[in-house]
Amino acid sequence: MLERYFQLKAHNTSVRNEVIGGVTTFLTMAYIIFVNPSILAQAGMDQGAVFVATCLAAAIGCLIMGLYANYPIALAPGMGLNAFFTYGVVLGMGYSWEQALGAVFLSGILFIFISIFRIREWVINAIPSSLKLGIAAGIGLFLAMIALQNSGIIVKNPATMVSLGDLSSPSAIYGLLGFFVICALSYLNITGAVMIGILLVTVLSMLLGQNEFGGLVSAPPSIAPTFLAMDIEGAFQLSMLSVIFAFFFVDLFDTSGTLIGVGQRGKLLDKDGNLPRLKKALLADSSATVVGAALGTSSTTSYIESASGVSAGGRTGLTAVIVALLFLLSLFFAPLAGSIPAYATAGALMYVAVLMTSSLAHVDWDDITEAAPVLIAAFTMPLTYSIADGIALSFISYAVIKLLSGQGKKVSLAVYILAALFIAKFFIFV
């Protein structure tokens, strides 16, 4: 049955290889079941319910990708967007978490729309590659800022806004230790480096009496506090436009890059370098975002960590199905997830920040009209505490700088339209 459904022989794989690939992928991304509830709880959401929503959204997303698109690509709530959800939209802009879920839901619907009508290529090609690089780097720096604050390494200062905290404090020491361990394990190609780092810091803090052990396994908490709690009507505001676009753009860029990257690693691309069944893969990703919002979590997206499972032998959707089953099994580890302190996840956030900020290496620094908007995107996201504002300012700066430098014809109509909408948001509909 598995052979017929997933075409294992045609993909030169076996059930054993698919299981190994699924387990490997899960171990490299399982940190999200600890990090996501911790971040969204700060937005006022019930941590137990978010834990369940995280596991279910990941499992459903993986099942859709595996059974419908037949790709070894796993999905879960995305890093960066969960931080934007909490620190940018809820705590920063003052919207309720229900409205934020509504924005996530609408961004997923928009993603489904462009996937069905095959206008993804037009949208992707209309956005300059430099802005994509700047947005990725900005999200990385945004995560780094959050991680440094959560561990007490950066603190408020009335004169300079931020300053160095007490590095001798337990939270700062644990945060840095986790980061150092994760980086070292990653360099040594240790599977599950991020999860090992989080658990090591958690256990160490417990042994030293600075954190309490809440238990290992139990029945899953109730999902009722977040299930279908999204406020779609509240998200239909002009001021929320940039938020919806932020969720949409980042998810779209993330997914496209992940699909191509994992496809190359697994030799899944055709002779023209395209991914077969791309429409199905995009629909799987966008549908997972909609389902995740309904369950009570931020945007669900394809994980680049899937490349580790592909490297271990995974080639078909059976790999993603194995990951889904492991996420369902994780539902019974809610007490452990609740025992993870914020400083234990700080190292993971800093590590992901390093990976995302590396996109700056591909910027054309010799062209100031390309480089300037990149830095505006990268710096304004952490400094304004908003991915949406960073995206908006980068689009405005790109359009204006290109226009003033006589290169206005090189800018797509889509960029001009978005820049005009963002200008209206800042200066007219304040």
Image: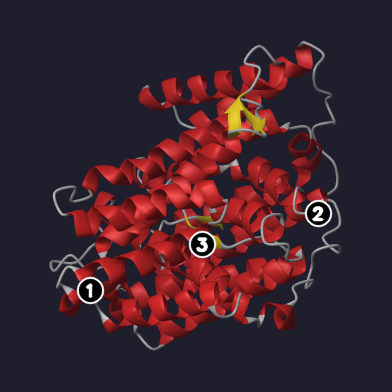
Residue 308 pos. (x, y %): 39, 42
**Depth check: 139 or 339 in front?**
139
> Do the residues bearing badges 3 and 2 touch, measured as CB atoms within 8 Å?
no
| Mark 3 or 1, closer to the camera | 1
Pick whichever of labels 3 and 1 is earlier in the sequence. Answer: 3
Q: Which residue corresponds to the image point at 45% horizontal and 67% vertical from the top-left? A: 392
The coloring applied to the image is secondary structure
* Lower sequence index among marks 1 and 2: 2
The part of the image, by quadrant, that contains residue 417 is bottom left
Q: Residue 110's x, y, as percent?
A: 51, 80
Question: For the residue marked with disc 2, what is the amino acid?
Answer: Gly
Which residue lies at the image location 60% right of the left edge and 45% below the top edge? 32
Q: Badge 2 local density, few (<14 within 10 Å), some, or many (20+)?
A: some
Q: Residue furthest front?
A: 159
Q: Which residue carries the number 1 mark?
A: 403
Residue lying farthest bottom?
Answer: 117
Q: Which one is closest to the eye, mark 1 or mark 2?
A: 1
Q: CA distance from mark 1 to mark 2?
A: 43 Å
Amino acid marked by disc 1 = Leu
CA–CA distance in space, label 3 to label 2: 22 Å
Closer to the camera, 322 or 190?
A: 190
Nearer to us of marks 3 and 2 is 3
Local packing at callout 3 (Cα closer than 10 Å; few below 14, some 14-19, many 20+) is many
Comes first in the chain, label 3 or label 2: 2
Residue 117, image x, y percentages: 39, 89
Near-viewer residue (426 or 134): 426
Place residue 408 in its image quadrant.
bottom left
Residue 292: in sight, yes or no? yes
User: Three-letter amino acid code at disc 3?
Assistant: Asp
The residue wearing badge 2 is 44
Residue located beneath label 3 in the image: 389
